[in-house]
Amino acid sequence: MKVFITRKISATGTEMLRQSGIEFTEWVEKRDISQDELIRFCQDYDGLISVGQDLIDELFLKSCRHLKVIAQMAVGYDNIDVAAAARLEIPVGNTPGVLSKATADIAFLLMLAVSRKAIFMHKRILSAEWGFYEPTDNLGIELEGKTLGIFGLGKIGFEMAKKSAAAFSMPIIYHNRRPHSQAERELGAKLVSFEELLKSSDVLSVHTALTPETRSRFDYSVFSLMKKNAIFINTARGAIHNEADLILALQENLIWGAGLDVTNPEPMLASNPLLNMPNVAVLPHIGSATEETRGAMARLAAENIIAASKGDKIPYQVKPVKS
């Protein structure tokens, strides 16, 4: 079996492929591979490890219907037309579970950084503005006892809730399609309506998948229903919030601050006004960026490829969402 990999990945994964007798090629150029290029390259390969947000739509899939497997090295797969892949009998796998703690760490970091204006204050040192002490200047807000709202309480959201409850005694409320019994049992989390989530959250952290229902869910009308002192955190997908509306909501003081590990588009332009707001923290999509997590993601992607090479069902297969 020959596999094309759209980025250089951890040796954990490539060594597994090598030991299984699978040939592979990694795309090593420091630019995104275009869809035309990817289609052309994949004609000579049996499998694909997609790293990042490669566009794997119906056009790609019909052009590469010979592929025996597509392994997405991420937990999210909104860039893949899974329904079209299923129709063409191309199994698609992802890497669930292994990045929950690392991504929750970033959500927690952003919550803290925003609450104390940490990134903005660091930039003041770099620009030689650390000067006269003013006791009422650039004050943050404390998190102790504040209410954390989770939009999409899955594995990552649960880890974020655990950290916040343990560190700051934060009551947890959440909005889900279905109850999360473990969070309710262990953390006293309360399932609420979307409207109640907006009205009651001091920090609102987004951990849902990107779907047609969640795309641009957080727009101006939604931000206007949140508390004036609320912090908005998004470590899921940038397209879940409307970035222009978020900027306007912050400028008009509809909410107090925002922390983003995901933006729309990515990468964010250096001229984006969010980068110079005192009560905003932006990171370049580093939720899973630890040696341990990226190694584990490469391992799961390799396991999907190896299973397909043997004609077995891949262990981390995703299925089309039922309408």
Image (tube, grey):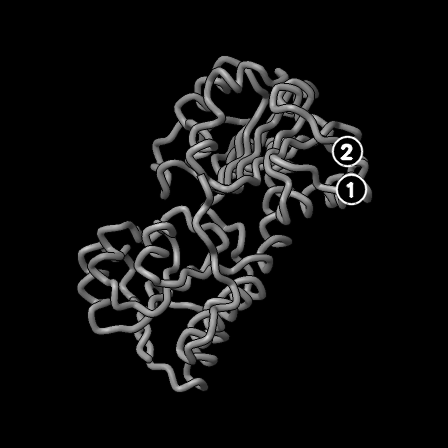
Image location (x, y in percent) of residue 193: 65, 24
Q: CA distance from mark 1 to mark 2?
A: 8 Å
All told, the count of numbered labels is 2
**Residue sitting nearer the eye, 104 or 310:** 310
Residue under label 1: 167
Q: Residue at x 73, y 28 (%)?
A: 147
What element does badge 1 sit on? helix
Residue drawn at x 67%, y 30% is: 149
Q: Amino acid at mark 1?
A: Ala
* Residue 107 sits in quarter: top right
For label 2, the residue is: 170
Type of amino acid under label 2: Met
Figure check: 58 above or below 19: above
Q: Residue at x 39, y 24 (%)?
A: 244
Mark 2 crowd level (few <14, some 14–19, many ≥20, 10 Å Cα): many
Q: Secondary structure at mark 2?
A: loop
Marks 1 & 2, CB-CB < 8 Å contact: yes
Q: Report x, y in % for residue 232.
A: 57, 29
Question: Where is the C terminus found, in terms of image quarters?
Answer: top left
Q: Is residue 321 above or below residue 231?
A: below
In the image: residue 292, left or right of residue 243: right
Left or right: 12 as drawn, with respect to 61? right
Q: Residue 258: in sight, yes or no?
A: yes
Above-or-below relation of 82 to 197: below
For the N terminus, the quadrant is bottom left
Location of residue 312 in the rendering, given as x and y in whole percent from the top left corner = 46, 75
Q: Give the crowd class for mark 1: few <14, some 14-19, many >=20 residues within 10 Å.
A: few
**Lateral position of residue 90 relative to residue 130, left or right:** left
- Identified at 33% across, 81% down, the residue is 23
Which dot, 1 or 2, sits closer to the camera?
A: 2
Name the side, left or right, on which 76 lies relative to 159: left
Residue 137 shows in this picture: no
